[in-house]
Amino acid sequence: MKSRATIRWEKASEDVFTDQKYSRKHQWQFDGGISVWASASPQIVSLPMSDASAIDPEEAFVALLSSCHMLFFLSIAASNGYIVNSYEDFAEGILEEGDNGGLVMTTVNLYPQVIFSEKHEPAAEDLVGLHQKAHEKC
């Protein structure tokens, strides 16, 4: 099985490039057809060379882990007979200075809020177990 993404960037004609003042905005296109704008984070590359409205790699990494956890959680919950009505996660990643002086994503915290059908709601310890199983799969 393969997953593909095409990443496109082009220098603006007025950019010198070697002065490091070129735009980091670029496009991610996925095999399903969706295309989104991406950029370096303004926390790492200052504006206007970055674009705050675009997805940055750090945000994408946090979203990837959150999405992976959610998808496994939903599957495991369904397999155990629980009915999930909604799932929302307020995930955050923490960048810190690494050993080499660069920034490193050291921690990703997930804060999922899950609403179950009242008829099929797990006990608190079962809910912890569902999240632990999803974490192990992801």
Image: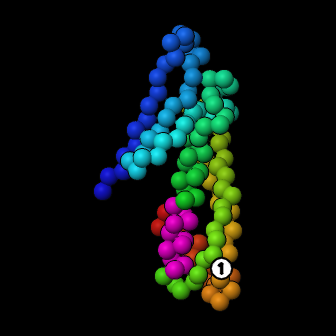
Secondary structure of the residue carrying numbered label 1: strand
Q: Is residue 117 visible?
A: yes
Front residue of this view, candidates 138 and 15 = 15
Q: Quadrant of residue 15?
A: top right
Magenta-drawn segment: 68-78
Residue 17, image x and y in percent? 52, 14
| 132 vs 66, nearest the viewer | 66
* Residue at the (50%, 77%) spot, across then down: 76
Characterize the magenta stretch by its predominant secondary structure.
Answer: helix
Residue ID for mark 1: 116
In the rendered image, residue 111, in percent from the top left (x then y), is placed at 68, 62
- Which image quadrant for residue 110? bottom right
Residue sitting at x 56%, y 65%: 70
> Which residue is farthest left?
1
The spot of residue 48 in percent (x, y) is 66, 23
The number of numbered discs placed on residues in the rendered structure image is 1
| Number of residues whose C-alpha sits closer than 10 Å to that of mark 1, classed few (under 14), some (14–19) or many (20 or more) | some
11 sits left or right of 128 in the view = left
Please, is residue 115 above or below residue 96 in the view? below
Name of the residue lying farthest toward the bottom: 119
Task: Give me the residue at 54% from left, 37% from top.
Answer: 37
Q: Is residue 40 magenta?
A: no
Of residue 30 and residue 59, the one placed in the foreground of this image is: 30
Q: Give percent across and percent down for residue 101.
A: 61, 31
**Magenta stretch encompasses residue 76:** yes
Is residue 123 visible from the viewing direction of this image? no
